[in-house]
Image (cartoon, rainbow, N blue to C red):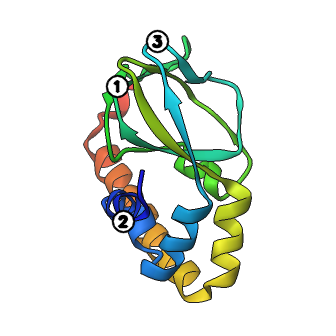
Amino acid sequence: MPLDEDMALFEQVPLLAQLGEEAMRILAIGAETHPIQNGAVLYYAGDLADSGYLIQHGSFLLESDAQSKREDLRIGPGTLLAELALLTDTVHTETATALTAGAVTRIPRSLFLKVLEGYPAAARRLRDAMAHRVDATTRDIETLKARIDPDEI
């Protein structure tokens, strides 16, 4: 995919858009494109996660492990998978299987962290955006807790 198309795709992802154009360009240049065949597994639940994956084209099924109560999810282009793996050691919580042939951009954690080191303003914007998301999620949880009848737990 040409760099200008990569940039357009990266700009659609809120987390990546926070980085700004220059940092995003470095990330796009260093990221790896991988074709994916229909039915191929990108990663399995429980695998160590060391990269994020941006779906360029095609679609995937995210299947949660047996203990999870989450429903399976179908996702497509512009979705960033394993976002947390860009920042910290973690494991995949679902299995990602291609429903159609396509391509993904693999963004290694090491590259992402180097970009943040080289662009401190981008790192601050990302930190602020993530703090806002955590705050919003916390408020949502508190709202839900207030609605739950303690006798139903």
Tag 1 residue: 73
Distance from disc 3 to disc 2, alpha carbons, whole Å, reads 29 Å
Q: Secondary structure at mark 3?
A: loop
Which percent across, then down, holds residue 59?
34, 27
Identify residue type, mark 1.
Answer: Leu
Residue density around tag 3, few if under 14, some if 14–19, many if 20 or more, within 10 Å: some
Q: Nearer the viewer, residue 127 or 60?
A: 60
Q: Nearer the viewer, residue 22 or 150?
A: 22
In-image side of 41 versus 115 (left or right): left
Which percent across, then down, holds residue 146?
30, 48
Q: Is residue 40 above or below residue 31?
A: above
Identify residue type, mark 2.
Answer: Asp
In-image side of 58 versus 26 (left or right): left
Label 3 vs label 1, nearer the camera: 3
Q: Is residue 25 above or below residue 15?
A: below
Say whether disc 3 or disc 1 marks the residue closer to the N-terminus. 3
Q: Nearer the viewer, residue 35 or 111?
A: 35
Residue at 36% across, 54% down: 142
In which quadrant of the rendered image does the C terminus lie? Answer: top left
Label 3 vs label 2, nearer the camera: 2
Tag 2 residue: 4
Q: Secondary structure at mark 1?
A: strand
Residue at 30% across, 45% down: 144
Tag 3 residue: 39
Which percent across, then down, holds residue 48?
73, 34
